[in-house]
Image (cartoon, grey):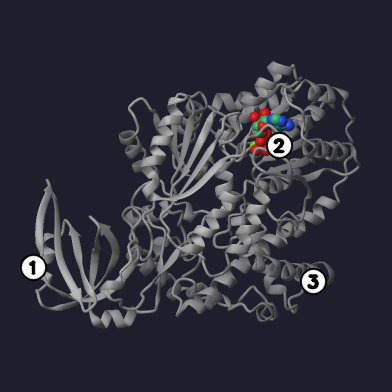
Amino acid sequence: MYLNDPITALKGIGEKTAALYHKLNIFTINDLIRHYPRDYEEWRDIVKVGELRANQVHAIRAVVISAPQTVHIRKNMTITTLRVRDDSGACDITYFNMPYIKNNFQPGKQYIFRGRVMLKNNRITLDQPKIVSPHEFVRNVNRLSPIYPTTKGLTIAAITKAVRAAIDALELTGDYIPESMRMKYGLPDLKTARSGIHFPADRAAMLACRKRIVFEEFLFFIVSVLFLKDMATQEINDAPMMRIDACQDFIGKLPYKLTNAQKKVWAQIEEDLCSTHLMNRLVQGDVGSGKTIVAVLAMFMCVMNHHQAAFMAPTEVLARQHYESILKLVEDYGLPFKPVLLTGSLTAKGKRRAKESIILGTCNVIVGTQALLQDDVDFYDLRLVITDEQHRFGVKQRETFAQKGIQPHVLVMSATPIPRTLALILYGDLDISVMDELPADRLPIKNCVVNTDFRKKAYEFIAKEVAAGRQAYVICPMVEAGEELMGDQPVLENVIEYTEKLRKVLPDTVRVEYLHGQMNPKAKNYVMEEYAAHHIDVLVSTTVIEVGINVPNATVMLVENAERFGLAQLHQLRGRVGRGREQSYCIFITTSSQNDTLERLQVLNKSNDGFFISSEDMRLRGPGDLFGIRQSGQFQFRLGDIYQDAAILQEAQSCASALYDAYVHHQAAADETDEYHGFWKYYEENVNANVDFINI
Ligand code: ADP
Ligand code: MG
């Protein structure tokens, strides 16, 4: 079996099952074995009934002391209850819609039950526990079994079986990480890591395998950055721009004064555009620091120098939003912009018209998404490309443009706060400007971190804010129900059901809608526009709204399962409120009662400073708590997390430099006897060609 084989190559996976895998973005064997567990289930030892704690998964050995009772609570709904005890106390056990289960128990006999502990009517209850044979228990105790992201119709057990079959059938030979490097950084070899990340013998083995995979993800990324850096420093600007006095006039007409940070960054950009080298600059500024206006100034200068400028966003929603705010600027300040919008969801005719005006030069500001990069888009005279909120998209496109014979200045805007040490590695190819100041007129956001008991109050609060004319966001980690619950996993809220629930709970006058990444672009645009126009009061969403969305009238952000998100990402989410003059609020709801999770979330309570928050995220999360935390979009690796794995990132950096030096100085790629030859061969075949290289 080969990595590139379709998953239907596995026995038992036909077209129908394959379609379910496709939903998880798994098409090939390679995709399947890179579908890493999002957590592991660890069977811990049996506890006493008296030690059961709500929300945890526990196993008990107990005697059935009451005959199982089944009651009908509604049509087609039954609950079967029995009571059990050991020498420390008694508890209830309940099964939903499983009336036949009562035949499995005999009062007076002892069983091992394993399941989630719930508090029902103030009684400790094991909910739907499995009955485990002593033999099975002994076999599983203290082992880790993988928990995979799933979708409706595909169970964790099925995925586990498929992954195991794929790993067994694959012939893995060689290792592209040179042995000397593996020794130096303590990395298991490829074969060990690939299988051990799914089926580790124990926790230590899992950590070692994970380290290898994270290291590898970072390594390829950093090597790509090193190549880009070399390219970037060689780019000559053959037509330096002129400074434009009208920019200063425009700044004078704005309803606010630029912050010192904005002035400083604008001066740097101005200098770049006039210099003898092409600009490759990253503007790193916290949410709300006012990056957009700096981008507009750069476009203004470019347009006044008779060139075209492009402004790209990672999503249609954002592109449209930027387009509209540019139209408004043109109207309000008479800017000489002739903007055009180019996104994937335009009609064929709309696209053709947009492309025509781009090549003829009848437009000078092009706003769009990735569609801009397509081969058949030609430019009249493009000299500046600005990308908002997506660094890699920005850098990779430099190559795409180069292929069209265009060498634009590149300006990348990012709100991902990254501590300086990491920024130097991840943005190694760019000059970095830091916008470390928020406009003075901002009221700091009020935050609270609470448990689920607080929901009722939170909904009342949202209703009150909506009644006062404000809007709210609610964030859930999942799109729809359907993921199985396993192990210690808390219930994950999902957008679809939560929307239904809010419609019931909130007053009828409150308009609740939802938004998520699986909707088609048109539907997403529509919902976003309706929200911006205040035809929607409460928007329930996944993190798709994380980047850039600007609706100043929104004053409440409620995040469910906050423990599932990285601090930097929560900070980004929070940045969607506090954008207007009204006081804004952020409510982080967590189902976790673990102290370290609470401590981590409290950081958000203490500070509204993205840089501080991200370094705390780095400090607080060691390799102990590994899985299930989602970081924000920009540096999303499959397994690696730049904050938590900062130490691995630094090791990968030094490894990458050594490999790169060898490439440059001894042509390691060409020399088959060189010990790094295997690495470079793999890199050229698999990484270099892959545009989306962050996700290799
Ligand atoms: P971000 O850096 O997150 O992209 P934006 O550019 O969207 O932030 O700016 C957020 C809001 O702040 C916008 O409504 C913008 O008009 C406003 N703004 C920008 N600069 C200033 C400033 N110096 N003083 C006051 N408000 C500003
Ligand atoms: Mg922005």
Q: For ligand 2, which image quadrant applies?
A: top right
Q: Nearer the viewer, residue 140 or 664?
A: 140
Q: Is mark 1 on a helix, strand or loop?
A: loop
Left or right position of 111 against 566:
left
Name the amino acid, label 1: Ala
- Coordinates of residue 563 in the picture (x, y in percent): 48, 55
Left or right position of 447 against 666:
left
Q: Name the residue under label 3.
A: 662
As drawn, 580 above or below 435: above
The C terminus lies in which quarter of the figure?
bottom right
User: For residue 67, which numbered disc appears in the image?
Assistant: 1
Name the amino acid, label 3: Ala
- Coordinates of residue 149 in the picture (x, y in percent): 42, 58
Left or right position of 557 against 268:
left
- First in residue order: circle 2 vs circle 3: 2
Give the CA distance from mark 2 to mark 3.
Answer: 39 Å
Please rate how many residues cluster around mark 1, counting C-alpha atoms within 10 Å: few if below 14, some from 14 to 19, many from 20.
Answer: some
Residue 632 visible to the viewer: no
Q: Nearer the viewer, residue 374 or 603?
A: 603
Give the CA distance from mark 3 to mark 1.
Answer: 74 Å
Name the amino acid, label 2: Lys
Disc 2 Cβ-to-ligand 1 distance below 8 Å = yes
Residue 148 visible to the viewer: yes
User: For residue 291, which numbered disc appears in the image?
Assistant: 2
Q: What element carries label 2?
A: helix
Q: Which of 618 and 638 is in front in this view?
A: 618
Contact between labelled residues 1 and 3, with CB atoms less than 8 Å apart: no
